[in-house]
Image (spheres, rainbow, N blue to C red):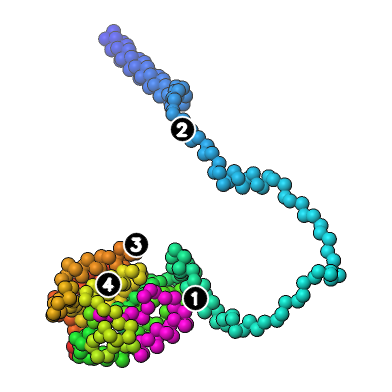
Amino acid sequence: MAKKVQSSRRRKAIISVLVISLIAHGVGLLLFGVWTVAQRFKRPEARFEMSQKVVIPPKPPDHKMASAEYESMMASPVLSEKLLTQRPLDFALPDLPTADLSAVLPTDPSQMVSDQVSVLSGVNGLGDALSRGLGEKGLGKTGVSFFGMQAEGDRILLLFDVSASVVNKAEKVGISLERIQEETLKLIETLPITARFSLIQFTVNYRPFSTELLPASPKNKDAAQTWVREKWATSGSLSRSAAGVIGNDEGVVGVLKVAAGMKPDAVFLISDASFQWRPSGGGGYPDVPKETLEAALEVIGETRVGGVPLHFLAFAPKEEDAQWWGRKSRRLGGTFQKMTEK
């Protein structure tokens, strides 16, 4: 009986210890949870930081703005009344005589614009600047087409090689001299009033339509078309004794020098890509060295910022000449069009 009582007491003691242990652990976990939650809501400690402050000093007012502000603050002038009379005085001037102004004033507005541009062109290139300004900002950049070759610019120059070899090769490829004339007349007709242009025919000697680029006025365009119809060389030669022909032993090199002096924006060159000269004035006409041709092209390129595009129309050229001029034309920003025999 005593053993049962003792065993019962031992079980109660163990159970009591376990219960107390569980309660103690539960209380501890509860306190730990409360502390953890409290840390979440705890305010962070104050931190003091110094950052560099960038201050841009105010820009002083521009002189023009300051002057304009000063002038706006000034008082406007007071208009004083004037005495007027409608009664004629003793010293009144007689009436001006009537004059017929139809004989002195142009009736075509485009002629008035072209005349003004032409007059201004002699004053340090002011006419050229006006023409370029109208073309680029007012009326659009000039665009022309010749045998399918497109060019942009306000100053157009056409160089025609009319030697016998070119005339013969042009006919072989199916393009007659009349067709070249028609395309030239068409190009001249489509030039806008803001453009300037000229034409040069050459073999070794050359014959220019003008010594400088002329405004594309109706008067100048008519004169150029008449020149193309009446002065176009058909015999394959230009004699120094012919009217308007200028002696030139350098051939295309001399023509390119003249072209550089005209300061074009775009150049059309029509030839068979084979050029001869007589630099020493002696007998025979050897081929122009390629390095001499390249130097002449560089001179033209220096007359305009960004270079002068060269658009080359070649009639049945030799393969070597076609490759050389094709590379040069593309490098100068132009095009090379080869016409081959059918």
Question: Element under label 2?
Answer: loop
139 sits left or right of 169 in the view: right
| Residue hosting label 4 | 256
Q: Answer yes or no: do the residues labelled 3 and 2 have beta carbons within 8 Å?
A: no
Q: Which of the two discs, 4 and 3, labels the residue nearer the N terminus?
A: 4
Pair 4/2: label in front: 4
Q: Which of the two discs, 1 and 4, labels the residue nearer the N terminus?
A: 1
115 sits left or right of 163 in the view: right
Q: Answer yes or no: do the residues labelled 3 and 1 have beta carbons within 8 Å?
A: no
Amino acid under disc 4: Leu
Q: Real-space Cα distance between discs 1 and 4?
A: 27 Å
Pair 3/2: label in front: 3
Amino acid under disc 3: Val
Amino acid under disc 1: Ser
Q: Which of the two discs, 4 and 2, labels the residue nearer the N terminus?
A: 2
Amino acid under disc 2: Val
Q: Answer yes or no: do the residues labelled 2 and 1 have beta carbons within 8 Å?
A: no
Pair 4/3: label in front: 4
Quadrant location of the N terminus in the rendered image: top left
Question: Element under label 3?
Answer: loop
The residue nearer to you, when weighing 183 against 337, is: 183
Q: Which numbered dot is residue 305? A: 3
> In percent of the image, x 34 and y 88: which residue is there?
231
